[in-house]
Image (tube, grey):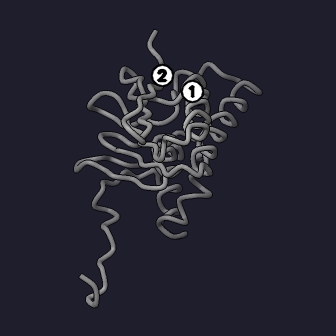
Amino acid sequence: MSAPLLFERHGAVAHLRLNRPEVLNAINPDLCGRLIDSIDEVEADPSLNAIVISGSGSRAFCSGADLATIKELTGMAKRRFIERAWTALDRLARSPVPSVAALHGFVLGGGLELAIACDLRIAEPGTTFGLPEITLGGVPAFGAIQRLPKLVGYGRALELALTGRRFDEKAFPPKRRSSHFP
């Protein structure tokens, strides 16, 4: 079995690559643990000045939580998984090391929550985003409800969380610069 998250150094940049392409890089407990360990490693190394997170394969950055794993979990085990995933993404969001999500393909559910936890997000054309949890009888549980309004405003965040609709990178065009500045 291969590692769920690969850690590579490229000069001063730590490249963390989700490595579960067979399940569209879905988040499971092992990936959460490795993400936390990797952030600890980056913060302990003063030669690393940035984190880039990407996904393996051509189909998805991350499709969200691993539904097969969630289906097997009950009671406290399910709660521990959700808490572990929330902790991993919160750890990333609070890291003093700047992070960039390199997005492609599907960025859904927990995958979008992971992207939101990063400081910057760069998406390839055609990237598909969404928070489909509501359509599955759940809610985003890894921090999106807290973080998303800061990025897109309360109304847009509520719309995305309550409808589960998908959108592409064009839904949030870059803000135009003032005519006073080039």
Is residue 113 shown to the viewer in this render?
Answer: yes
Is 9 above or below relative to 99? above
Q: Secondary structure at mark 2?
A: loop
* Cβ–Cβ under 8 Å for marks 1 and 2: yes
Estimate the x, y position of residue 26 in percent, counting from the top left.
46, 29
Estimate the x, y position of residue 116 in percent, counting from the top left.
49, 52
Estimate the x, y position of residue 106 in percent, counting from the top left.
34, 40
The outermost residue toward the front is: 47
Callout 2, which amino acid? Pro
Label placed on residue 4: 2
Instruction: Describe residue 44's horizontal placement relative to residue 171 as left or right.
Output: right
Q: Residues within 10 Å of mark 1 (few under 14, many from 20)?
A: some
Q: Nearer the viewer, residue 21 or 179?
A: 179
Residue in the image at 50% along x and 44% along y: 114
Q: Nearer the viewer, residue 23 or 116?
A: 116
The outermost residue toward the top is: 1
Instruction: Describe residue 53's horizontal placement relative to residue 122 as left or right.
Output: right
Callout 1, which amino acid? Arg
> Image quadrant of residue 43?
top right
Q: Which residue is mark 1?
A: 34
The outermost residue toward the right is: 76
- How many badges with numbers are in the image? 2
Q: Nearer the viewer, residue 56 or 73?
A: 56
